[in-house]
């Protein structure tokens, strides 16, 4: 039996998206052409734009398709700092980010602030991973506040942040790549990722609020209403649209069963229990056991999970998110539930993990002796 609980890294394509993509996988139609194949491709792309716009709560014409969530997040940060090819300068004197943003935001913000000579403000979080209310400084170019954290599932008070940004005249970027299954909040910029939402990898979208515009990051073509150069990935865009239009199952019960099982194991602590959390991500620590040893043990039992975010897997560095929370970043486990997760999947974890933790603790004690 194989149990896949790493949906927060990449989720299998939902059947609806696979079916929608199938006709376009063997067609080479360019949506910019006026022949019949081109017109059909354009219609398919615009239908997907309608689907994504409806899911994000923005006008279809304010949806820009990208190659990934990372591209879209980088794009907004660089535009705010005045680093895009057609930029007329930075939008303000500083960039504000939370300490638990995805590295696609944090690394871009640090680089952009250095290159553009802007101030960078990092908002701390409490031990549950939530931000406290903060005032947006004057002349702020951009505030980045993730909606659902990619490692803990903690939901940030984006609505309150949006109000404060509006009051200060600052623009708000919301990383909603992990917001599948929950209502996406309104913001000036909202980003989603296809491979997190049941669409194909290599797709993403940037949704614009009504009061904003953005200069292109990629130039050399007139695609995406002059906002992103490069030929459209028609099959991928169609798949992303279908995934956004597909209802997501209620995972609260399965999440709670997993949390109960984890909480019954001595020395295992579920991260962020005191915060508002999305139902599809559960993070726990098992001090002082290493996250890698736990993952290997689970994998041998046919259970695939993760430790920290997928983007740091090759560096094998402790999670910056858990560090910011004061949690044990070296012994973390992250379980990502998805559209195909079943009760038997959760039962497999709850049956396997207690003995695995006990075995690893015993080995550690004997090694220390």
Image: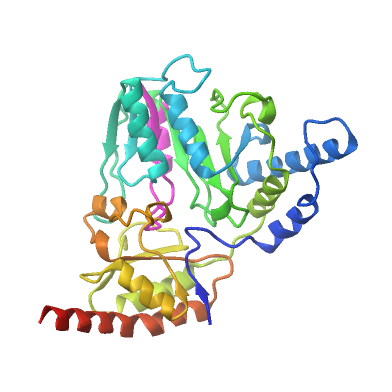
Query: Which image quadrant for residue 170?
Result: top left
Which residue reaches farthest top?
88
Residue farthest to the left, as pictured:
369
Q: Does residue 186 appear in the picture of this structure?
A: no
Q: Does residue 64 show up?
A: yes
Q: Position of residue 162 (x, y in %)?
A: 42, 35
Where in the figure is residue 323, as x and y percent of width and height? Answer: 24, 53
Pinpoint residue 153: horizontal percent, then vertical percent: 40, 57
Of 199 and 220, nearer the camera is: 220
Q: Which quadrant is the C terminus positioned in? A: bottom left
Residue 307 rendering spot, x and y as whole percentages:
36, 63
Residue sitting nearer the eye, 289 or 52? 289
Please tell me whether residue 49 is drawn above or below residue 166 in the rendered image.
Answer: below
Looking at the image, which residue is at 51% across and 20% down? 85
Q: Quadrant of residue 112?
A: top left
Q: Is residue 55 above or below residue 275?
A: above
**For residue 206: magenta?**
no
All told, the count of numbered labels is 0
* Left or right of 346, for residue 133: left
Asked if 338 appears above or below 268 in the picture, the reply is above
Left/right of residue 118 with respect to residue 17 in the rendered view:
left
The answer to if 159 sits in the magenta stretch is yes
Q: Specify how the rendered protein is coloured.
A: rainbow
Q: Is residue 101 above or below residue 3?
A: above
* Magenta residue span: 139-166
């Amino acid at each position: 039996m194989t149990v896949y609980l790493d949906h927060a890294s990449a989720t299998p394509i939902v059947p609806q998206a696979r079916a929608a993509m199938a006709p376009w996988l063997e067609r080479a139609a360019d949506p910019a052409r006026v022949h019949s194949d081109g017109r059909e491709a354009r219609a398919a792309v615009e239908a997907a734009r309608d689907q994504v716009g409806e899911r994000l709560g923005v006008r279809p014409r304010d949806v820009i398709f990208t190659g990934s969530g990372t591209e879209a997040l980088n794009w907004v940060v660089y535009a705010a700092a005045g680093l895009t090819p057609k930029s007329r300068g930075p939008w303000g004197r500083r960039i504000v980010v939370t300490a638990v943003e995805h590295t696609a935001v944090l690394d871009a913000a640090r680089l952009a602030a250095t290159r553009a000579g802007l101030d960078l403000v990092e908002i701390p979080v409490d031990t549950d991973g939530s931000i406290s209310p903060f005032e947006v400084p004057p002349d702020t170019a951009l505030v980045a506040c993730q909606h659902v954290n990619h490692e803990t599932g903690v939901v940030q008070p984006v609505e309150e942040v949006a109000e404060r940004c509006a009051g200060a005249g600052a623009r708000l970027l919301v990383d909603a790549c992990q917001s599948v299954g929950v209502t996406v909040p309104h913001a000036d910029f909202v980003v989603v990722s296809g491979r997190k939402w049941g669409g194909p990898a290599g797709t993403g979208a940037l949704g614009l609020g009504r009061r904003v515009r953005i200069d292109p990051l990629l130039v050399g073509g007139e695609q995406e209403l002059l906002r992103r150069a490069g030929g459209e990935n028609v099959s991928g865009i169609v798949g992303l649209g279908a995934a956004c239009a597909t209802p997501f199952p209620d995972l609260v019960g399965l999440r709670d069963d997993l949390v109960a099982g984890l909480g019954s194991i001595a020395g295992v602590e579920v991260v962020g229990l005191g915060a508002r959390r999305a139902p599809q991500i559960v993070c726990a620590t098992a001090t002082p056991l290493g996250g890698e040893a736990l993952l290997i043990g689970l994998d041998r039992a046919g259970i695939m999970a993760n430790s920290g975010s997928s983007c740091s897997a090759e560096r094998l560095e402790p999670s910056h998110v858990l560090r910011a929370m004061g949690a044990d970043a070296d012994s973390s486990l992250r379980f990502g539930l998805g559209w195909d997760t079943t009760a038997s999947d959760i039962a497999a974890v709850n049956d396997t993990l207690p003995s695995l933790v006990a075995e690893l603790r015993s080995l550690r004690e004997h090694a220390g002796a």
